[in-house]
Image (cartoon, rainbow, N blue to C red):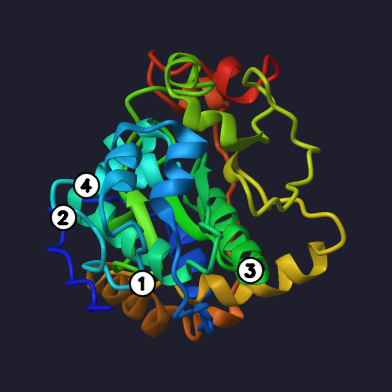
Amino acid sequence: MPGTPRMKRMARAPAVLSVTVLLLLAATFHLTHVVLRSEDFVDIARIASLRYGSASGRRMESSASTKVGLSPAVGQPQSVGYAEQLHDVYGVPQLIVDNMSQPMRKRLLGQLRERATAGVLPKTLIVHPQNGLGNRMRVLASAMAWVKIHQPRVVILVWERDVHMGAGFLDVFEENKDLVVVDSLSQQWPFSDARQQDMAWSNVSLYNYMDTEPLSNKNAAVVEDRDRHIYFRACEFIKVPGSQRDIERFSAHALKHLVPVPEVSRTLSKLQERYGKLSHKIGVHIRQMSVRSEFSSEFDASKEYGSES
């Protein structure tokens, strides 16, 4: 399969990072990423038509060429675009696909094809980290560790700017070919309208650990089901029955798989010159004020953190 071309870097807005955040970024390891490959074929037109009742699936099934291998060009009608294939064939919810850039759609489709085996369509882990940078890094690292254990899922990272985190993922980290990044969603949790209008959501297991939000359960363990996509929304480690120790161990390595952009790296180097090796330091975040007084008047502290904040 041809390599995915490197995307042009997004224009970066200046991001202000505290010493604590920079110390968090300094803790990096290298993750050995294992990708499953197969030369098998998948009858995706038949599966799409049966599972999702899709128009494109029916069009493809009527074609003389319905067997599709791992090469993007084999058996794929040129009239079927990336978005249609992701939704109609692989069952990725339309809300996720619609808010994804075209290069990211291409990357996701390529990674799903790479992981396809005979009669089985691979699924995604849609990870939606919440709150500040430290929380988001923890959520993302645990999700990457979970996928390492439960191959062959593809990680879709929804990284939205908000009052807690004003920088985009690519403002802080170099592009990572193993991650499909979505900058924002046009609907917010619990995606009521999208779930009513798009039957693909019926094949997505939903997990929300944000206890101030509706339909959340921070104690729910994420259960692996290879027939379903997973949406995970949290500000803490993913919980996995029987594998929590492995998740925590692999998460440390996953963090080092995230490479800071040059601007952040230069700042880290200056800090290291001043304070010595950062890997021997501990970052501490001390609040000087209440949450209510620390943010703008539009910020609802009780909604974000609970009535006691």
Mark 4 Cα-neighbour bin, 10 Å: few <14, some 14–19, many ≥20: some
Relative side of 35 to 241, left or right: left
Q: Is residue 236 above or below residue 245?
A: above
Nearest to N terminus: mark 1 or mark 2: 2
Relative side of 94 to 251, left or right: left
Q: Residue at x 48, y 79 (%)?
A: 38
Please state which amino acid type lies under the numbered disc 3.
Ser
Nearest to N terminus: mark 3 or mark 2: 2
Relative side of 80 to 216, left or right: left
Q: Which mark is residue 10?
A: 2
Does the rendering let one see residue 167? no
Image position, residue 242 (x, y; %):
87, 61
Image position, residue 4 (x, y; %):
23, 72
State the residue position of label 3. 251
State the residue position of label 4. 101
- Nearest to the observer: residue 64 or residue 293: 64
Nearest to N terminus: mark 1 or mark 4: 1
Q: Which mark is residue 70?
A: 1
Give SS at disc 1: loop
Image position, residue 195 (x, y; %):
49, 21
Q: How many marks?
A: 4
Q: Is residue 183 above or below residue 8?
A: above
Q: Residue furthest right?
A: 242
Q: Residue at x 32, y 36 (%)?
A: 184
Q: Is residue 274 above or below residue 22?
A: below
Give SS at disc 2: loop
- Nearest to the observer: residue 213 or residue 125: 125
Q: Nearer the viewer, mark 4 or mark 3?
A: 4
Q: Are marks 3 and 2 in contact (CB under 8 Å)?
A: no
Please state which amino acid type lies under the numbered disc 1.
Leu
